[in-house]
Amino acid sequence: MAKYQAPKGVSEYFPPRSNDFEHVMRALMNPALAAGYEPIELPVFEDTELFTRGVGESTDVVSKEMYTFEDRGGRSITLRPEGTAGVMRAVIEHNLDRGQLPVKVFYKGPFFRAERPQAGRYRQFYQFGIEAIGVNDPYLDAEVIAIGYSGYKALGLTNFSLHITSLGDRESREKHRTSLVSFIDRLSLDDETRARAAKNPLRLFDDKRPEIQKLMTDAPLLLDFLNDASRKNFEEVQSALTSIGIPFEINARMVRGLDYYTGTTFEFVHHGLGAQSGIGGGGRYDGLMETLGGQNLSGVGFALGIDRILLALDVEKVSVSKNSYTDLYVIALGDEARKNSFALVQKLRSAGFVVEQSFGERGLKGAMKAADKSGARFSVVIGDTEISSGSVELKNMATGEAVSVTLSALATTLAEKSK
Ligand code: HAM
């Protein structure tokens, strides 16, 4: 056993799997770029209060799962458990909401939740997320959902569903809350559950315990309390999705794990992942900016779980194409050849080829093995003879076939053969 090991429950990616990780990130990013979203890079730690206020104290994320510590200046700092609160903080702090609206940004990176580790649930995990801030328009909700959906599709995932619901506007939520609270008051609950329900009664819908699920069977559903404006808004989101061929299921009992949501909420659920089936989720959060001290503007966004998407691709046996490939592997034998080929490799790389070279004095056999392992499409061996003759044998690694090429024509020949 290695002397040092990664902390419990973190996900790590190293070659070759890390190539798949990059590929997934890129595939998810493309639809966001195509829709005009721009990158935002934010700190992985923030003042703790940003999350307690922004994400909400009734959530597991805030009450049980935050990595919180005091920094050297005595400030309470938390490793970000999610990205939306940080984006909103940055938008307010840097006045991004005073320009063109909606502000459309995407982010990716590690997030931290002290959850009980299991397959698909990690303490450090990776998300790709987007946020569109400042405009309340059902078509924007649908655009956000479509961007996530397109990413999964581009990766080749098929065995997943989109669940959507609506939390309506404030009036609808308040009416429903009154009815739900009086329903919950009549249930026999332990003190802890009751305290949780007092902070956010919707939490009881996503309580995993079967006895609570049973008690909640007849609980009033928010969808039945939507007023006309909220219902119309939700219908518009649905017809926008239908118009671009995105299938969805309405799931009236779905409750997201964060408290800032209003209006449309959604989750992408994969059918092959067991308990940790959520591969992405999001929704509208119209009060968040004001809660965090900004103006009263709306927002909508999602975050997709990279780790779970990778697992889903495995389950669906979708092979993720290796995105780092090598055109040419150069093996130099002898001092003079090493000197010459080092410069040649540099030149070929500047010309746009992916070129690897052998290092260490390991002899021809060892170097050929390395060339093989690299997955390079071609290889050349450069020794004293090749330097003096000015030509090399360009070997096709798949077929074993070799052609003689002058060193000066290597780039053009490689280009021709790569067509
Ligand atoms: P979330 O549903 O908490 O939403 O997380 C989004 C996704 O991150 C989940 O669907 C899941 O795939 C992944 N994820 C969450 N926790 C873990 C974990 N412990 N291990 C592995 N993967 C995990 C949010 O974070 C919101 N900020 C999304 C959002 C953006 N809403 C509006 N804008």
Image (cartoon, rainbow, N blue to C red):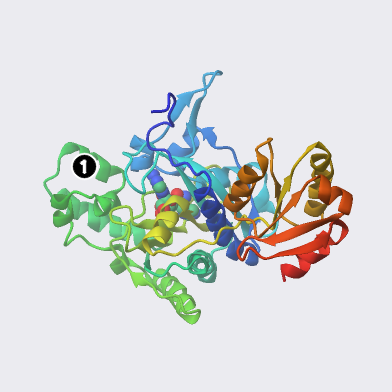
Q: Which residue is mark 1?
A: 193
Secondary element under disc 1, as helix, strand or loop, is helix
Task: Please name whichever residue, 188 or 321, is drawn nearer the observer in this view of the structure.
Answer: 321
Q: Is residue 376 left or right of residue 197?
A: right
Name the residue: 63% across, 50% down: 371
The x, y position of residue 5, in whole percent, is: 43, 29
Q: Is residue 82 above or below residue 63?
A: below
Q: Amino acid at mark 1?
A: Thr
- The picture quadrant where one finds residue 221 is bottom left
The quadrant of the image that shows the C terminus is: bottom right
- Extreme residue in the left direction: 188
The x, y position of residue 97, in whole percent, is: 65, 52
Task: Please name whichever residue, 19 or 278, is drawn nearer the observer in this view of the structure.
Answer: 19
Task: Please name whichever residue, 12 or 374, is drawn nearer the observer in this view of the structure.
Answer: 374
Task: Please name whichever residue, 415 or 281, is drawn nearer the observer in this view of the structure.
Answer: 415
Name the residue: 38% across, 64% down: 316
- Circle 1 packing at 10 Å, graded few (<14), some (14-19), many (20+), is some
Q: Is residue 383 visible?
A: yes
Name the residue: 34% across, 57% down: 277
Q: Is residue 312 left or right of residue 399?
A: left
- The picture quadrant where one finds residue 217 is bottom left
| Label 1 within 8 A of ligand 1 by Cβ | no
The x, y position of residue 399, in whole percent, is: 61, 66
